[in-house]
Amino acid sequence: MNLDNIIAERKAKRIYRDGDKVIKVFDSDYSKADILNEALNQARIEETSLNIPKISSVTMVDGKWAIISDYIEGKTLAQLMEENPEKFDEYLNLFVDIQINIHSQKAPLLNKLKDKMNRKISEADIDATTRYELHTRLEGMPKHNKVCHGDFNPSNIIITNDGVPYIIDWSHATQGNASADVARTYLIFCLSGREDIAKKYMDLFCKKSDTARQYIEKWLPIVAASQSVKGKPEEREFLLSWVDVVEYE
């Protein structure tokens, strides 16, 4: 196992390429349960028709847990958007089409999105009255069982040299209401300071999926509160502002 070629660094993890494999090595204090859950999520998504890198093993490297999966040759959709701004609309259309395809899948053994969000809202640094309102709104939302990526953004899509899209990073995957997944992507764009793209994305998704924008907007405070739990301090302040501005019915 060769760990000379680092291709990415994330908080508490490093990603290496060794030939046709990717080795994701987690810090020694990273939650073992979270690592095994990520591998399990990916294995369950492998059983759908989606293009994703397949896991070959979960192992230990120098006393640290690691997930080894296929290396996908290509560029991320985020890179392509940056390199070819004249094709941005084409790439955004592809981005939305891929997300709609994800939501068309079923993976009945995935964790439930609603359970995860209820837990996160309980942990959020907000007052009891607001938590109660968020729990109530969440319970009132329609119950679905669609595959939700949980961190769907252009950097988690790799386009191969022959144009085939692969979706990576399934650590946050759940099954539930697709509009919560869309709200999460919308907030990711907003967090990166791209409110213009966030709006364009939302409009395009609503049009292509025939979803009412108001329906997705009902999810925004719920998703913002749940995402605030482990966010960076500056992100947490932004996310909680989405919770504060809500006028509850």
Image (tube, rainbow, N blue to C red):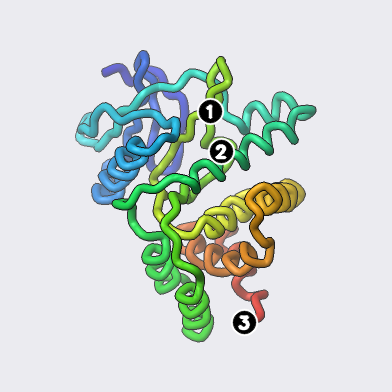
The image shows residue 116, relative to residue 68, as above or below, that is: below
**Residue 60 at x, y = what percent?**
20, 33
Earlier-in-chain disc, 1 versus 2: 2
Measure how far apart labels 1 and 2 are at the Cα level: 8 Å
Name the residue: 45% across, 22% down.
Answer: 72
Q: Which mark is residue 165?
A: 1
Earlier-in-chain disc, 1 versus 3: 1
**Residue 192 at x, y = what percent?**
65, 48
Helix, strand or loop at label 1? It is strand
Badge 2 density bin: few <14, some 14–19, many ≥20, Cα 10 Å: some
Amino acid carrying label 2: it is: Ile
Whether tag 1 and tag 3 are in contact, CB under 8 A, the answer is no
Query: Can the viewer see residue 97 in this picture?
Result: yes
Q: Quadrant of residue 159?
A: top right
The reply, left or right, for residue 178 in relation to residue 204 is left
Query: Can the viewer see residue 198 in this picture?
Result: no
Measure how far apart labels 1 and 3 are at the Cα level: 40 Å
The quadrant of the picture occupied by the C terminus is bottom right
**Residue 228 at x, y = what percent?**
51, 63
Residue placed under numbered mark 2 in the picture: 98
Q: Nearer the viewer, residue 67 or 70?
A: 70
Name the residue: 70% across, 24% down.
Answer: 83
Residue farthest toward the right in the current orientation of the protein: 86
Name the residue: 71% across, 47% down.
Answer: 204
Whether tag 1 and tag 2 are in contact, CB under 8 A, the answer is yes
Helix, strand or loop at label 3? It is loop
Helix, strand or loop at label 2? It is helix
Amino acid carrying label 3: it is: Tyr
Amino acid carrying label 1: it is: Pro
Earlier-in-chain disc, 3 versus 2: 2
Name the residue: 32% across, 33% down.
Answer: 25
Residue placed under numbered mark 3 in the picture: 248
